[in-house]
Image: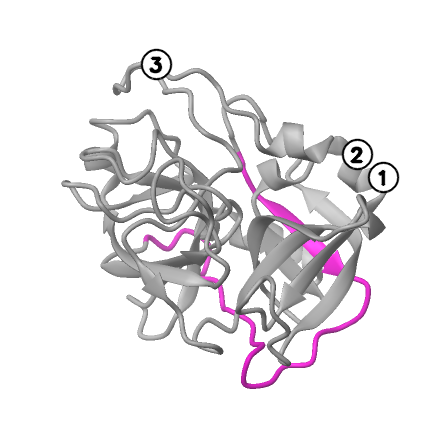
Amino acid sequence: MRFLLVCLCLAGVSAGPAVRPHFRRGLNRIVGGTEATPGEIPYQLSFQDISYDQVFHFCGASIYSETWGICAGHCVSGEDWDNPNCLQVVAGEHSLTADDGTEQIRILSKIVRHDNYDGVWLYNDISLLQFSSPLTFDEYVQPIAIAEQGHTATGDCVVSGWGSTVEGGYAPDVLNKVTVPIVPDEECAQHLLIEEYMICAGYPDGGSDACQGDSGGPLVCSDTGSPYLAGIVSWGYGCARPETPGVYTEVSYFSDWIKTHTGS
């Protein structure tokens, strides 16, 4: 059932500053990127369904602490809250099909989705994933910091995931990454209708983006002098299209909310 909820595609309409386009949800992937090296992105999580006698990767997520991950709200449905032990995250993952020897698997014990989440427009598209037991931090598994409340990201940032490498194509087996520049809100708003808690990233000519399988995954920036989680892969109009940047949940808008609900 989650596959239908997470992977539902809505009919497209023309993009513009006055009308939000309908978009592909939960089907995001890395376009125009390269394969990451094992351990290069130690904060990356694979979010997986284990309820159908096989493991199914359907979203990305990020490690916030030993016991919490940060994900998109649209990656979890109401039924997930009732039975989170049918979901797991894998830290230290590189290949989804091979045993890398670095993986740490944790069943979920709790899901917290933002109270004001809207699944139609993807308002407040953020959730927290509590692990059933703590992760052990090592060379391949590390948390990613978040910026202080209200910080605005700038510069080039890295988005990563296991999504497909061309629009409508198949997903790769290994973790991919791509560098994309932050697009100022006023520029992004010329093409897409965004809210104050969204952040855009991409090139004017397109070619590099997140799209199928990357939803919920990290956009990490370093304009503060060290890497931090600036965005969560949320939505986009197509994938890597010219003048159509990817849209991410702006994590710094929710920093205080994250700290309150994780007790950190």
- The residue to which callout 3 is attached is 13
Element marked by disc 3: loop
- Label annotation for residue 82: 1
Q: Which quadrant of the figure has residue 107?
A: bottom right
Residue at left 25%, top 33%?
A: 244
Residue at left 46%, top 63%?
A: 175
Which numbered disc, 3 or 1, marks the residue that appears first in the sequence? 3
Q: Are marks 1 and 2 in contact (CB under 8 Å)?
A: yes
Q: Which residue sits furthest left?
A: 205
**Callout 1: 10 Å neighbours few (<14), some, many (20+)?**
few
| Front label number (3 vs 1) | 3
Element marked by disc 1: helix
196 left or right of 216 in image? left
Residue 124 position in % (x across, y down):
54, 36
The type of residue carrying mark 3 is: Val
Which numbered disc, 2 or 3, marks the residue that appears first in the sequence? 3
- Label annotation for residue 79: 2
Which is the main secondary structure of the residues drawn in magenta? Answer: loop
> In the image, is residue 131 part of the stretch drawn in magenta?
yes
Mark 1 vs mark 2, CA separation in Å? 5 Å
Q: Which residues are magenta?
A: 124-152
**Callout 2: 10 Å neighbours few (<14), some, many (20+)?**
few
Residue 196 position in % (x across, y down):
39, 35
The type of residue carrying mark 2 is: Glu
243 left or right of 28 in image? left
Residue at left 58%, top 26%?
A: 118
